[in-house]
Image: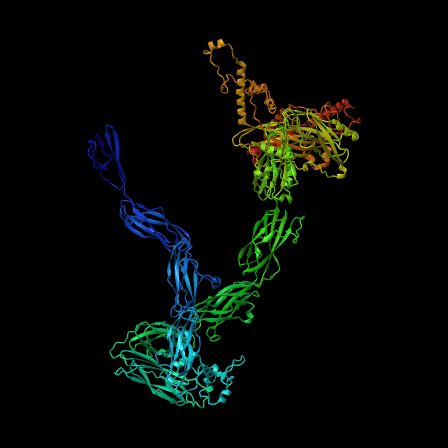
């Protein structure tokens, strides 16, 4: 390819010199381009390449690099909890080729990181957005990123919309025991009873119901934490819970002190949450309950060196195992031993132990042995026995001696020597065997004071263990010892001895003191082969003397540990021959604990393996003697010795430890009992001391806390309690929390001064609080007056262990104010409106409490009916207003919605007065009733009303008044607006309730819906009724056909037998002769709905069909649909009713008014009628030859579908009601008998009042059409015009409008007054013809001129409305039809066959217009016959020839018929009166009517048609034409306009204004003289054939002359009336067109000054 190129045009781009470039297939060629810019801007150029195939260009462009960053439009942060944070990232990318520096600007709660940085070209950076909201809101905020060159502060900027949603977190505690949760004030986790030293775990869930992740912390409530730690522990202290998830927390309860209740509160705090939750933890620590099966074991008398074994049971009745140990040396150093000496008793079990008695000397033995129980006080067992030898046989010791000893000798320090001393003791008596025994306890007898002050067994035991020298015992609590030993413990080869001694044999002295007044014999129990020995083994000790014994430790084996408990028995030394056995005193026993070891110097002692539980001992914070136990367990394989190091802590002097030394065999244990009295100066955090193990450096530390703690109770709210203002006499409650912050359980009691007991109270007033426990108390405040109260109840509390001792007091300040409360309603009167009777309606009454205190109230309702005819008896009729809440409390400054239900029982105006009364604290009424508001409503039934009617189809020629009578719409509206009966409400809604084809009817109201009559196979008679809901509630209405009320049965239940009525109704329903559309509906208040009722004329005859019109919860009316179908060749007149009532007429009236009666031709042929005048003649004869009733047109012709007016003159002779039955004959038809009724009244009796004023009569149908019907093209602004009462010969004018409802079609309106000659004489409508564009309205002027004879006018003006589009189609079809008729008239067909064949090809078919023909050469022949001829024979049986003729006739192209116009009916009603009568009854209206003397007289009926003479006042009138009238009016109009335009004439009018006006008085037109009835009484037609024509003609001539004279005199008045009338009509026309605004303010025009000329 050979290419030539054009270099760039500009000098900024340069390339190679232009040359031809050859590019072979598959190769390329590069052209270098050099760019040399001169300034910083953009450059553009191009290089053009040309070849033989064409040319193309390559654009050269240089662009200035700029900084560009790519960021997302918006960033949505994850949902976040308040005071939490969430984050996300987005990419920030440098899309430019320059190094770009960026800096973010963003406000809280969003934070971007990194906030600034530097990006290389194309480099991206992830920006982290952190969202930290502080409120639960929707956050939308713009983050601005400023970027550019480094140091360029005015660089570019881009934005990112940061969006975040914050929610409040919420956490709930679940799976907790909620027993008494309301009383405890929150959730509680109960652990129940747990054994001491054991642990129990329970769980609870922390659930997050919020949509955000919640962070929480779980901590103990501040205050009240035990000094040595809590017994509750939780494995979770903080964490996070995802939305909808839960976290399980474990709480462990490890109690340490028996018979205590542990309480602690955990506070669940969620960051950002609105509330805090407290979880209460409670647990009860229980210990073992151990008892001995016997308190005394009697071994009896045993020979020396003999042995006796007895059993005793140790019973554990608790669910906790018991660890026990007998304080007895069972290694042989005692005459008594227990097997086993220590062990464990399982829960709810017992252990049987062996007690062994091995005496070595013939003496009496007695020793009280303690059984140590861990965490319990020890149990004591008395062991007694007597040893006899061959030489010595002491008295046998029995259990009774122990009892006597406790009762008598316990308080004596000298032995009794005579029986008299025993008899003097009131607590001892002799039994039947002569043995001393204690008296039975008497209820009114108290023991001796010495017995009361005797010490407890555990104190005696401590004295026994401490050798009778107890440093902590007091004289008030215990007696002085009988025998004491010092020291009570001996330690051999321990640190207390000299470590320089090399010999293992050592001895120590023991001193025993006799504190009695008798001589004691001391005997030590000697054990053979024991490393411990004592010397002497026995001796006598004088009273109050001491003696020493030497205890020697001589181990037989080296490197061993030894321990023993040496016992010594002491008894009174007496001569057995002189001592009565009944006075035997048991011996005392003292023991000395000894331990020692035989380890050589430098030899390493045994390494002890032991455990000490617990390591911490806490004594109650009371200054009383307390005991605690610990367990020292040897878990090793070697024995160990322990001893208390008295030098380890100086505070150890206040604590006694028993035993303080001893030997523990491998696997065995030792229970240590600690005793102390806590003091206030003890260390607050406790002190520690050590147990030395194996006489070496090995020790065990034990911490003791024994400090007196002061009781501490906290009162919520800084010991203040404030009540809100309270109504006087009522009560307000508040809760107040009381918490025990001390370690002691305490009891409390509130003390309220007696004067304040009526004002405040508290529940509970007393109770018990465990350590760290809270009590929620309810305080009640009941003020008695309007003032402020300050009350100070006192809280008294004391430790539970020391009742009524060490009482403490706290004062709570209670402040409350009494005020007066009242309530009111937002609206004093609440009008609910209308409510359906029998239905429920909710009513809300806002009650407002504007007082400063809550008000407790009760409500009452009083009902009243405002209708005078209704009387409400509260006993028989309940209140229709029911309150949902009759009692309640409204908080201060707040509103309460009082909900109530209204259910009216009847149709009436209800008024309820709601009153309130305030209640006191006991719930009793404390004030008189006060009306707070009134509620009004009106009980209504559903109402419906027919507001308009419209006809079409075969009855389109009937006006609205005619339809109103045919369908009894006045009666229907009256019933629809009335109350339903109880039977009509049997089924409140449409229900299928009958199994018959003719269902039962529950209403007595039946109305006729008469569809009039129409020929067979004519268009259906359609009536459209406009239903309107005038009420304020929706109305559900339904037309129920018989089939709609029938229950559908199964096929097997149908009988198949039907009556004639059922068969007829089935025929009507199957052929749909009567149809209603729609059959049901709902109308909202004020809404309207058109319902179409149609009757099809398919069968000849009269049809009737019952239809129930049902309003749900309202009226039920039976409508009898009626319709007549007439054969097309049968004459038929339809009468609205066979009864007609004339307007009442005054008797003696010489000019009674003319009245009309309508008859309607419902057939297809004209009907000639004739009124039977013979009945009228007979009526005249019966009334003294006075024509009571005259028919002016007894014979006439009524065209099909039109209405004829029968004119009657009713002239009563008497003041009564006349009933006249007159036959009306129809030529070639049936006759109908019509009853005419008329009433005559005497005007003299009525006086000036005239009850028969026509102007007061209610119009029979609505005058104005509010809503157009569907398909209606045009409608009138008024459907009826009522002129009221007018004088004769007067002219009245009215204006109305015709509106085109179509939005697309133009309509033509024509007033048809030609066919009704009587209308043309008295009524004129201008314009008679008009064309209306879509949506246009035209103003029409109705001019009514009454005749000279009084008449009651009921005129029906018809306006024919035709659509222009339909008329255009008709003219087009008519033109084509006429063209075809001319063509068929001129065209003929030659039937010559040969001629046709020879010339057929050359003759061309004529060109014609018209529709395209398929088969025939010419169109069917034209026939102008009406279609009525063929339609009349449809129902008859035709022959073949007739059917052939009909087929040929059907092929005929008939003349197009003009479109059927829509008819608008305008009813004009008036009643004219004679001048004198009008002046008499309407004097103030006489001058308001213009009387026109150019009368239009009605034609007199021909005498040949009626032989009934007319009243004298009714004379024949002649119609006079004035063709020159229009010319005169036009000329005068032009002249007057020219005169008014002349300035000189206008000036002359101003000049003449100051002159007096001269009137030419004209006589008022004299009333027409009444012409009396002819003196010759006219008879019937047979008697008088003619009437005196001469008199009649003469009279007529006089009237004509008089009228001509009057017309001449009042010609100028007529002209002025016409001019003014036309002027007003023109103004109204201009106002309708918008050319004149009638409501504009008048403007004053200042004319220029008149010139001098």
In the image, 1599 versus 813, the foreground residue is 813
Residue 443 appearing in the image: yes
Image-based side of 926 in relation to 591, left or right: right
In the rendered image, the vertical position of residue 1425 relative to residue 571, given as above or below: above
Image-based side of 1160 in relation to 391, left or right: right
Q: Residue at x 40, y 83 (%)?
A: 302
How many marks on residues?
A: 0
The image quadrant where one finds the C terminus is top right
In the image, 981 versus 1458, the foreground residue is 981
Where residue 947 appears, as percent x and y from the top left, is 61, 37
In the image, 1259 versus 708, the foreground residue is 708
Residue 1511 appearing in the image: no
Image-based side of 109 in relation to 556, left or right: right
Among the 4 quarters of the image, the one containing residue 589: bottom left
In the rendered image, the vertical position of residue 995 relative to residue 489, given as above or below: above
Where residue 968 appears, as percent x and y from the top left, is 65, 36
Image-based side of 1614 in relation to 138, left or right: right
Among the 4 quarters of the image, the one containing residue 635: bottom left
The image quadrant where one finds the N terminus is top left
In the rendered image, the vertical position of residue 132 relative to residue 1069, given as above or below: below
Where residue 123 appears, as percent x and y from the top left, is 27, 47
Type of colouring: rainbow
Q: Residue at x 23, y 37 (%)?
A: 13
In the image, 1455 versus 226, the foreground residue is 226
Where residue 827 appears, as percent x and y from the top left, is 57, 52
Among the 4 quarters of the image, the one containing residue 443: bottom right
């Amino acid at each position: 390819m050979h290419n030539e190129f054009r270099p760039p045009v500009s000098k900024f781009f340069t390339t190679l010199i232009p040359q031809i470039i050859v590019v072979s297939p598959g190769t390329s060629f590069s052209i270098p381009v050099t760019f040399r810019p001169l300034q910083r801007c953009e450059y553009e150029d191009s290089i053009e390449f040309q070849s033989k195939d064409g040319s193309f260009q390559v654009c050269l462009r240089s662009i200035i690099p700029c900084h560009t960053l790519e960021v997302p439009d918006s960033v949505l942060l994850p949902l976040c909890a308040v005071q939490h944070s969430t984050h996300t990232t987005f990419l920030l990318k440098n899309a430019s080729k320059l190094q770009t520096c960026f800096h973010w600007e963003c406000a809280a709660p969003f934070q971007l990181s990194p906030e600034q940085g530097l990006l290389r070209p194309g480099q991206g950076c992830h920006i982290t957005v952190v969202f930290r909201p502080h409120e639960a809101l929707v956050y939308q905020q713009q983050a601005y990123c400023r970027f550019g060159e480094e140091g360029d502060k005015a660089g570019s900027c881009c934005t990112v919309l940061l969006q975040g949603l914050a929610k409040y977190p919420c956490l709930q505690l679940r799976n907790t025991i909620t027993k008494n949760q309301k009383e405890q004030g929150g959730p509680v986790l109960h652990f129940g009873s747990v054994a001491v030293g054991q642990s129990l775990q329970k769980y609870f869930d922390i659930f997050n119901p919020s949509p955000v992740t919640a962070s929480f912390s779980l901590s103990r409530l501040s205050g009240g934490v035990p000094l040595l730690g809590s017994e509750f522990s939780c494995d979770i202290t903080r964490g996070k819970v995802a939305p909808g998830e839960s976290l399980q927390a474990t709480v462990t309860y490890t109690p340490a002190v028996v018979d205590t209740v542990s309480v602690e509160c955990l506070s669940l705090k969620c960051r950002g949450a609105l509330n805090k939750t407290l979880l209460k933890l409670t647990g009860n620590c229980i210990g073992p309950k151990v008892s001995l099966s016997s308190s005394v074991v009697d071994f009896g008398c045993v020979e020396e060196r003999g042995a006796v074994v007895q059993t005793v049971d140790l019973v554990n009745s608790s669910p906790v195992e018991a660890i026990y140990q007998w304080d007895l040396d069972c290694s042989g150093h005692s005459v008594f031993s227990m097997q086993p000496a220590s062990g464990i008793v399982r829960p709810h079990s017992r252990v049987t132990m062996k007690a062994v008695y091995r005496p070595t000397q013939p003496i009496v033995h007695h020793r009280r042995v303690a059984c140590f129980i861990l965490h319990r006080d020890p149990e004591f067992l008395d062991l007694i026995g007597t040893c006899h030898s061959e030489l010595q046989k002491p008295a046998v010791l029995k259990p009774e001696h122990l009892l006597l000893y406790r009762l008598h000798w316990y308080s004596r320090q000298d032995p009794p020597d005579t029986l008299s001393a025993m008899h003097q003791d009131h607590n001892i008596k002799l039994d039947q065997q002569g043995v001393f025994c204690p008296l039975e306890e008497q209820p009114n007898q108290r023991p001796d004071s010495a017995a009361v002050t005797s010490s407890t067994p555990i104190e005696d035991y401590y004295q026994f263990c401490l050798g009778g020298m107890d440093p902590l015992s007091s004289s008030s609590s215990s007696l002085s010892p009988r025998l004491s030993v010092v020291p009570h413990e001996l330690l051999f080869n321990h640190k207390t001895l000299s470590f320089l001694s090399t010999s293992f044999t050592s001895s120590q002295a023991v001193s025993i003191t006799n504190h009695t007044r008798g001589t004691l014999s001391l005997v030590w129990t000697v054990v053979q082969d024991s490393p411990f020995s004592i010397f002497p083994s026995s001796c006598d000790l004088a009273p109050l003397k001491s003696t020493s014994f030497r205890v020697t430790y001589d181990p037989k084996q080296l490197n061993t540990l030894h321990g023993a408990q040496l016992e010594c028995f002491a008894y009174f030394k007496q001569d057995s021959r002189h001592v009565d056995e009944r006075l035997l005193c048991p011996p005392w026993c003292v023991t000395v604990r000894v331990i020692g070891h035989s380890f050589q110097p430098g030899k390493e002692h045994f390494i002890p393996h032991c455990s000490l539980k617990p390591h911490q001992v806490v004594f109650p914070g009371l200054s009383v003697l307390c005991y605690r136990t610990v367990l020292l367990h040897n878990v090793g394989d070697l024995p160990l010795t322990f001893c208390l190091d008295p030098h380890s802590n100086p505070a150890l002097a206040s604590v006694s430890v028993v035993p303080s030394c001893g030997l523990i065999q491998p696997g065995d244990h030792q229970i240590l009992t600690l005793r102390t009295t806590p003091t206030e100066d003890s260390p607050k955090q406790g002190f520690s001391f050590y147990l030395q193990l194996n006489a070496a450096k090995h020790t065990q530390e034990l911490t003791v806390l024994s400090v007196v703690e002061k009781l501490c109770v906290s009162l919520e709210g800084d010991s203040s309690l404030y009540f809100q203002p309270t109504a006087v006499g009522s009560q307000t409650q508040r809760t107040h929390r009381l918490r025990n912050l001390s370690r002691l359980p305490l009891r409390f009691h509130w003390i309220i001064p007696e004067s304040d007991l009526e004002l405040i109270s508290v529940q509970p007033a007393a109770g018990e609080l465990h350590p760290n426990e809270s009590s929620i108390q309810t305080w009640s405040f009941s003020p008695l007056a309007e003032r402020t109260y300050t009350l100070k109840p006192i809280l008294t509390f004391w430790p539970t262990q020391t009742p009524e001792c060490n009482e403490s007091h706290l004062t709570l300040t209670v402040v409350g104010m009494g005020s007066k409360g009242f309530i009111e309603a937002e609206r004093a009167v609440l009008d609910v409106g209308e409510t359906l009777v029998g239905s429920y309606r909710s009513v809300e009454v806002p009650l407002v409490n504007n007082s400063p205190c809550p008000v407790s109230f009760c409500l009452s309702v009083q009902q009243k009916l405002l209708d005078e005819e209704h009387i409400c008896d509260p006993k028989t009729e309940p209140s229709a207003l029911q309150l949902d809440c009759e009692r309640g409390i409204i908080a201060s400054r707040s509103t309460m919605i009082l909900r109530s239900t209204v259910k009216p029982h009847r149709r009436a105006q209800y008024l309820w007065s709601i009153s309130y009364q305030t209640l006191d604290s006991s719930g009793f009424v404390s004030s008189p009733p006060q009306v707070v508001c009134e509620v009004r409503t009106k009980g209504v039934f559903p109402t419906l009303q027919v507001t308009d009617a419209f006809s079409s189809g075969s009855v389109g020629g009937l006006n609205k008044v005619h339809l109103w009578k045919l369908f009894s719409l006045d009666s229907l509206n009256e019933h629809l607006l009335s109350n339903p009966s109880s039977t009509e409400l049997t089924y409140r809604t449409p229900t299928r309730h009958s199994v018959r084809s003719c269902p039962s009817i529950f209403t007595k109201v039946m109305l006729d819906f008469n569809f009039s009559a129409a020929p067979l196979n004519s268009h259906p008679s359609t009536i459209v009724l406009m239903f309107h809901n005038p009420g304020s509630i929706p109305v559900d209405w339904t037309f129920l056909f018989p089939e709609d009320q029938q229950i559908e049965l199964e096929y097997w239940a149908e009988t198949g037998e039907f009556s004639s009525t059922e068969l007829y109704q089935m025929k009507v329903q199957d052929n749909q002769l009567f149809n209603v559309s729609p059959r049901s509906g709902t109308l909202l208040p004020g809404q309207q709905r058109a319902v179409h009722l149609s009757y099809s004329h398919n069968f000849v005859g009269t049809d009737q069909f019952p239809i129930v019109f049902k309003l749900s919860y309202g009226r039920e009316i039976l409508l009898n649909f009626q319709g007549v179908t007439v054969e097309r060749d049968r004459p038929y007149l339809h009468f609205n009713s066979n009864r007609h009532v004339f307007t009442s007429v005054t008797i003696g009236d010489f000019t009674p008014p003319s009245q009309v009666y309508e008859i309607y031709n419902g057939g297809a042929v004209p009907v000639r009628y004739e009124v039977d005048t013979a009945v009228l003649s007979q009526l005249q004869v019966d009334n003294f030859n006075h024509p009571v009733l005259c028919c002016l047109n007894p014979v006439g012709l009524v065209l099909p579908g039109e209405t004829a007016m029968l004119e009657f003159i009713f002239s009563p002779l008497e003041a009564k009601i006349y009933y006249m039955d007159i036959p009306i004959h129809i030529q070639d038809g049936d006759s109908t008998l019509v009853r005419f009724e008329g009433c005559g009244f005497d005007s003299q009796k009525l006086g000036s009042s005239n009850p028969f004023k026509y102007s007061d009569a209610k119009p029979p149908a609505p005058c104005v059409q509010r809503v157009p019907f569907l398909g209606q093209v045009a409608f009138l602004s008024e459907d009826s015009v009522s002129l009221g009462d007018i004088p004769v010969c007067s002219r009245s004018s009215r204006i109305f409008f015709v509106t085109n409802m179509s939005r697309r079609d133009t309509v033509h309106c024509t007033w048809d007054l030609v066919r009704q000659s009587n209308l043309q004489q008295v009524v004129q409508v201008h314009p008679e013809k008009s064309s209306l564009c879509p949506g246009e309205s035209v103003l029409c002027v109705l001019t009514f001129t009454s005749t000279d004879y009084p008449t009651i006018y009921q005129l029906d003006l018809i306006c024919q409305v035709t659509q222009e589009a339909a008329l255009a189609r008709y003219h087009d079809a008519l033109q084509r039809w006429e063209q075809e008729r001319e063509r068929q008239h001129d065209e003929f067909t030659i039937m010559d066959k040969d001629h046709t064949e020879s010339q057929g090809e050359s003759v061309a078919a004529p060109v014609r217009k018209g529709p395209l023909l398929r088969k025939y050469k010419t169109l069917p022949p034209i026939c102008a016959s009406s279609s009525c001829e063929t339609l009349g024979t449809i129902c008859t049986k035709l022959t073949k020839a007739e059917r052939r003729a009909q087929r040929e006739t059907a092929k005929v192209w008939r003349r197009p018929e003009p479109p059927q116009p829509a008819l608008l009916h305008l009813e004009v009603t008036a009643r004219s009166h004679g001048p004198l009568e009008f002046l008499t009854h309407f004097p103030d209206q006489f001058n308001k009517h213009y009387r026109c003397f150019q009368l239009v007289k009605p034609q007199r009926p021909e005498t040949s048609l009626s032989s009934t003479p007319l009243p004298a006042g009714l004379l024949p009138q002649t119609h006079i034409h004035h063709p020159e009238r229009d010319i005169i009016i036009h000329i005068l109009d032009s002249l007057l306009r020219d005169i008014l335009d002349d300035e000189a004439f206008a000036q002359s009018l101003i000049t003449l204004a100051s002159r007096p006006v001269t009137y030419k008085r004209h006589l008022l037109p004299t009333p027409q003289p009444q012409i009396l009835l002819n003196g010759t009484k006219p008879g019937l037609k047979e008697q008088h054939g003619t009437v005196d024509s001469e008199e009649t003609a003469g009279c007529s001539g006089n009237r004509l002359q008089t009228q001509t004279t009057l017309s001449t005199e009042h010609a100028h008045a007529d002209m002025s009336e016409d001019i003014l009338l036309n002027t007003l009509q023109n103004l109204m026309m201009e106002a309708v067109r918008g050319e004149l605004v009638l409501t504009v303010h008048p403007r004053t025009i200042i004319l220029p000054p008149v010139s001098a000329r």
